[in-house]
Amino acid sequence: MYDIRINNDLRMHSNMCIRHKFFLGRMAAEEQKIEKLQDEINQLREELQRKERELFDLKFKKYHDNKYCLGLTATDIMRYSRQMLLSQFSITGQIALKKSRVLIVGMGGLGCPCALYLAAAGIGELTIVDYDEVELTNLHRQVLHGENDIGIPKILSAYNRLKNLNSNIKIIPIHTHANSSTLTDLFKNKTFDVVVDGSDNVATRYLLNDICVLNNLPLVSGSALQMEGQLTVYNYNKGPCYRCLFPVPPPPDTVMNCGDGGVLGPVPGIIGTLQALEVIKILTKQGGVLSSRLLTFDACEAVFRNVKLRTRNSRCAVCGDDPTITTLIDYEEFCGASAHDKVIDVDILRKDDHIPVKELSSKPETLLIDVRPTLEFAMCNLDNSYNFPYSYIKKGKDLDKLRKKLEDYSTNGNEVLIICRRGNDSQRAVLQLKEIFTDLPLKFLNVLGGLYAYSNAVDSSFPIY
Ligand SMILES: [Zn+2]
């Protein structure tokens, strides 16, 4: 009942998300058709899942009650036999997994492979938390989600896939943003043995660290970006916590996410899989847990390194001898950064420094400077746009080339339009270009909302990435 109710709630939610997220500017009739089709598919999927479970039960029912092995069913023995044959795992390990409760925060590039292996291994109860919906840009690395899941909550997509993999374990999907309030509520109602950090931001790292220290739980922490990954276990066996190593959060503008920096799919795949391995080792009380050590993975060179970390800091604000943090705080405020990877719009120009994206087509002769990085410009760009990355403007690189371009142009026109991916860097560029080229008779204007807005409001065939 619990599972079906969740499915129904999420299905309704998923339809709402689809309405709001994907069909802005499209015709209502088309929207209704897609929504109706999505509803039908959701119903068919539920029906299919019910029948598949019925079939599995029929095939394996006779093995459910078993007098020959204590604590496990005969199905369990068959399903998990290959790992139970390991001397360091054995039947004791399998029973320990069956009784265990694991929380994974984040169903992204790390959380997906981690959840997949934990569900396959037979973790008794897997709670998965995520606030986000599946997007096309997720699919190259977030392997639980498929094309048909675009627009639905990630935890619903993950729930369906994991339940399909192992219907004998309990999976609890929670569609929420992990913050002090939601996690306090969650920990009031449930207990866990291990927590996995599958998030992608510093605020959530501190939040999960503190809640693990306050509840005396190990935190299996991973990160992956571009061609590098890292892994360690905090607050385990007298080892350090995240705050012992990083008492102060990094400046927000020094932190990069996958949406800006990029990531190759197998990199989080490897780190997430290793997170699952550490969870299993902790739960089955094996040695060699990655505590007080950091594993780094360099995908370019195919090199793993093991770095020794400092020991627990007796002056740590949360796990030290005299802690000052005894309850959860506001982590977004503490880090000066949001606890998600969504870009926050900046608003730093005067009203008359902008032009709406719809006016682009009426100014074909006007110089349009695209300030995205060269790599992004090469992926897709507007006709007649000139690429000069914002990073060059910031560093003062090749400004003589830009000056030449602007001087040549100023004999014909006086407006220069600046565009970028989302309309944030272009605003920063406008401010700086105004300062640098005060001597030229030019007016720099920001194209509101950037190429995202262009795709939404002018031509939906322009790729959003
Ligand atoms: Zn600490």
Image (cartoon, rainbow, N blue to C red):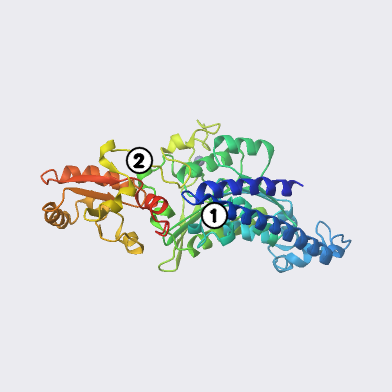
In this picture, residue 62 sits left or right of residue 5: right
In this picture, residue 38 sits left or right of residue 209: right
User: Label 2 neighbourhood size at 10 Å, few (<14), some (14-19), many (20+)?
Assistant: few
SS for dot 1: helix
Q: Which mark is residue 30?
A: 1
Q: Residue 346 carries which label?
A: 2
Residue 164 pos. (x, y %)? 69, 60
Badge 2 or badge 1: first in the primary sequence: 1
Confirm whether residue 75 shows in the render. Answer: yes
Front-most of 318 and 263? 263
Residue 176, by quadrant, is top right
- Distance of label 2 from label 1 (alpha carbons): 33 Å
Residue 401 against residue 320 in the figure, above or below:
below
Residue 64 pos. (x, y %)? 84, 60
Front-most of 283 and 207? 207
Q: Which mark is residue 304?
A: none
Residue at the spot 77% in from the left edge and 61% down from the top edge: 51
Residue 40, by quadrant, is bottom right
Front-most of 275 and 295? 275
